[in-house]
Image (spheres, rainbow, N blue to C red):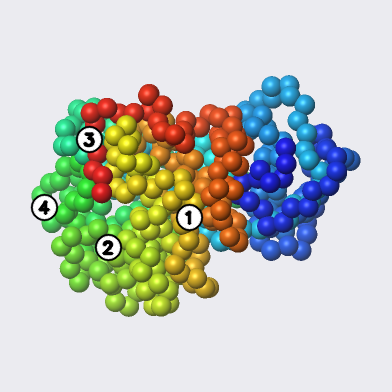
Amino acid sequence: MAFDTLLPRPVSVTPTAGSCPWPSTVDARAASLPAEAYRLEISPSGVVLHCGDLAGEVYGRQTLRQLAGPSAFRAASLGDALSLPCGVVEDQPRFAWRGCLLDVARHYRTKAEVLRFIDLLAAHKLNVLNLHLTDDQGWRFEVPEFPRLTSVGGWRPSSMVGSGGEQDGRPHGGFYTGDDLREIVAYAASRAVTVVPEIDIPGHARAALAAYPSLGTSESYEIWTSWGISTSLLSPSSSTLDFFKQVFDHLLEIFPSKVIALGGDETPGATDEHRKFVRLLAEHLVSRGRTPMGWDEVLDIPDLPPMVIGSWQNEEAGVRAAAAGHDVVMCPEQHVYLDHRQSSHPDEPIPVGMVHTVEDVYAYEPALTGPRLRGVQAQVWSEHLDDVRRVDYLAFPRLSAFAEVAWSSGARDYAEFLPRLRDHHLPRLDALGVEYRPLDGPHPWQTRPGVPGRPR
């Protein structure tokens, strides 16, 4: 296996003659290297891995797996005699924030499925999982003080089929206990992945309103069984503010992430009081030593504390956020929304949004540069992803292309990337059991005939 088949592409590769058998141990040594950087020295006598921190060691070991071939990605050895090409790899990431959002609110993913997704992020040297825990269609985060958030808000009686309005009549739900989430956080940390939780306010909150109607302005609410943007907003009252301060305080006990996401997006009918509500919760997070993260709509709120802004509506929002003194994660729907359709072919299952091919994702280059740009993030929203096979289909191999955008510096050429992806990386995904979309279109069992989408 040649060094030029690595993905994401390393900063520097110096091949030498010979090969090294797969080592029983790796000589990992602390070194004066930047955060997340590593240096691999592979010789016939063994492997030395120089790293400045745990993340660098994790990424160096992932590179060794890649060099050993697809069999190294299987859960158990097949008895293959694995070997490594000799040489030196020097590597470090382009961006500090290399993220992916996974929406577990619209369609719940089991704890085991979340752990598997973390493994897939780590295999691609991605380091942030933005876990979207609450929305109109479900609340997935256990808060002992408010048990109805999960006993009521964690379940819905039905779900919309595609975007046509038809309901499937099948109950759907689930939630994570505090210990489940602590386990997810610890598992991710051991793989150099930070879990950034998101509790969405003041919109996308019908599940919370169904559980506790006093948080709103009506006597009762039903958990939403449709997709789209609900007009139901939290009441910006002092009692609702106190409620969510307790929710976020409990969240902080579980998630050590410096950044905590509070949503703030898609709030039709929001008033100045709603905007003040978001600002006060952001200030509360700051008072607890955390940095709030919000979607770019929050830029319209006056007197915000310094935040991380997720620039999703367009790239101009990220430029505006940086100019206002906020850090930015670029995640524009025009480029890196992986729930959007992968082609305009009629066999594309439940086609929504714009066409984002693998080549389109690989070509993405953030418009913002400079110290305010923390990094980039792909988005996997799950309205139409009702099982983990659908997540695999929409995320991969586009997330593989995104990983190289996030990690590798310098010019990119899709004609150079494609054979590395097709001939070397897709077999790794096969070994991992990822049911990705083939490059030439979906398998027959990946199609969803007759289920309407909402293409743009």
Q: Point out residue 208 in the picture as x, y percentages from the top left corner.
A: 25, 48
Mark 3 = which residue?
452
Instruction: Examine the image and state in which quarter residue 295 appears.
Output: bottom left
Which circle marks residue 241 in the picture? 2
In the rendered image, the residue lying farthest to the front is 415
**Identity of the residue drawn at 73% across and 24% down:** 80
Marks 1/4: CA–CA distance: 47 Å
Marks 4/3: CA–CA distance: 33 Å
Classed neighbour count for the residue bearing mark 1: other residues with Cα under 10 Å, few (<14), some (14–19), many (≥20):
some
**Identity of the residue drawn at 49% across and 45% down:** 399
Q: Point out residue 110 in the picture as x, y percentages from the top left corner.
A: 42, 34
What kind of residue is marked 4? Answer: Ser
**Depth order, front residue of 278/100:** 100
Mark 1 = which residue?
363
Residue 350 shows in the view: yes
Q: Nearer the viewer, mark 3 or mark 2?
A: 3
What kind of residue is marked 2? Answer: Leu
| 66 shown above or below 370 | above
Marks 2/1: CA–CA distance: 42 Å
Q: Earlier in the sequence, mark 3 or mark 2?
A: 2
SS assignment at label 2: helix
